[in-house]
Amino acid sequence: MSKNSQTVRPFGTRDKIGYLFGDLANDFTFIFASGFLLKFYTDVLGVNSYWAGILFLTARCVDAFTDVGMGRIVDTMQPTKQGRFRPWLKRMAIPIFIINVLMYLHPAAKLPMTGRIIYMFVTYILWGSIFYTAANIPYGSMASVITEDPGERTSLSTFRSVGAMIAGGSIGVIAPLVLFKKVNGQSELVPERFTLLAIVFGFLAMAAYFACYKLCQERVQLPSKKKEKGAGFFQLTKALIHNRALMAIIGSAIAMLLCQLLGTAMLTYVFQDYFNNADLMIFGSVAAALPTLIMAPFATKLSERFGKKECSIVGCAIASFFYGLLFIVHTHNPIVYITLMLLGSVGMGFFNMVIWAFITDIIDYQEVKTGNRDDGTVYAIYSFSRKLGQAIAGGISGFALTMVGYVSSTAGEVVQQSQKALDGIYNISSLVPFFGYLIVMLLLIFVYPLNKEKVRENARILAERHATKAKNED
């Protein structure tokens, strides 16, 4: 299954940095949307948050087809000289830049309300369900063909997470400084700056996609699959549904994304409305991202010594504890809030670092069980679950803001929120992560089967199979 070692350079730092650029590219648009698109809809377009919730849930219904469809495309397509997965990064870089800019056009606020809602639906679905999917599915699937070694795959996951943290930290610091200005001591939104930031982050994403394409190398050649009829597809789907490890990590991903993305979306409201100080949002963003970056050098060593599953259980328990404490104290002191956020982020940092290595372990697990390798489809199903988590987070954000009485504004003017709305915003930002990380911990303990020993055993079995197959072909 591996390419001739004389024609392919060995796995190394270049691949790790290249893979980092891939997630950097994804998250320059994804994290900006996760943290500020709802704010753009409610406070620039002046659309009720209810419609944003409907949009996010509708888009995930579309993703059920586009994600899995893209997974089957990359699994069945004939590889090019550049590989099976890499070319999609180059193909989608420019379209993603364009649609990312179109999604944040502040003049759209001048449209009639029906026009604004249509604009939201068209641009968001084109971005997330079509173009982003066409880059993200091949990118995620590519990890399993860059290297077969479990330890090297964990290092790819670590570098990928560092890319996400760099993007998240950059956006968390830059966006509040650009989007808000002080007016009479209050933080006021500047609508036209959304479009400016969309251009900047979109351009950076485009450049990072090209860097990932250039630096990474596909080494493991997978046999091209014949395009299957409906029965074959449904048989594969049935097999994946019975993959206990995949189902456990899907549940974990939904819960984790609910925590992270809802927390990111709520951060804007917590600091601008609850604490009445949008400037402090920068420190909140740093508190969420910094622990993961600090843990990056240790993630691979910890996972090799104790196991990814084992370390992640401890981390999620710590995260759940501190977010629960955040809810109990219900502080009005932003320093206390940021400190408890920081401690909670330390807990979830390890799981966030190695989550992508779980997927390559699951792909191996599927091959051991069935004899078939379906990298693109497995990753697509997992990717859809992440988008489902994103949708639930976006939907809960929109619906919950409506339920607690949050009042949307038009053109960024300041609206005085009720105390009920302010307390509701705080409670959402602390209770959801508390329950979410608790659920992840329980799923890893009682459902996910791939502990340290099982991962190593699967890698050994596949190495023996591949060596035997190569010998027979010779």
Image (tube, rainbow, N blue to C red):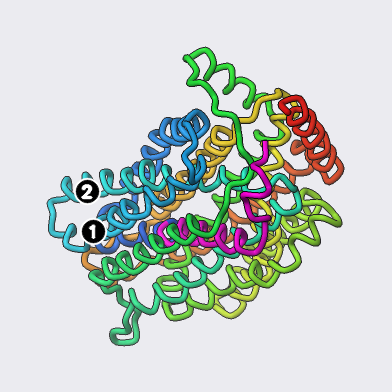
What is the residue that sits farthest to the top in this orientation?
231
Q: Is residue 34 visible?
A: no
Residue 191 drawn above or below residue 444: below
Secondary structure of the residue carrying numbered label 1: loop
Q: How many marks?
A: 2
* Location of residue 223 in the rendering, given as x and y in whole percent from the top left corner: 59, 29
* Location of residue 52 in the rendering, given as x and y in whole percent from the top left corner: 34, 48
Mark 1 or mark 2: name the one nearer the start of the chain: 1
What is the residue that sits farthest to the bottom in this orientation?
184
* Location of residue 55 in the rendering, given as x and y in whole percent from the top left corner: 34, 43
| Residue drawn at the location 64% of the way across and 55% of the way down | 9
Q: Which residue is mark 2?
A: 119
User: Mark 1 is on which residue type?
Assistant: Leu
Residue 211 drawn above or below residue 435: below
Q: Which residue is mark 1?
A: 45
Q: Quadrant of the N terminus?
A: top right
Secondary structure of the residue carrying numbered label 2: helix
* Location of residue 414 in the rendering, given as x and y in whole percent from the top left corner: 28, 72
- Between circles 1 and 2, the one closer to the viewer is 2
Q: CA distance from mark 1 to mark 2?
A: 10 Å
Count neighbours of disc 1 (C-alpha within 10 A) and say few if under 14, some if 14 to 19, many if 20 or more: many
Highlighted range, magenta:
1-29
Residue 222 drawn above or below residue 260: above
Asked whether 383 or 112 is in front, the reply is: 383
| Residue drawn at the location 18% of the way across and 59% of the way down | 109
Asked whether 381 or 376 is in front, the reply is: 376
Residue 28 drawn above or below residue 371: below
Q: Which mark is residue 247?
A: none
Q: Is residue 10 magenta?
A: yes
| Callout 1–callout 2 Cβ contact below 8 Å | yes
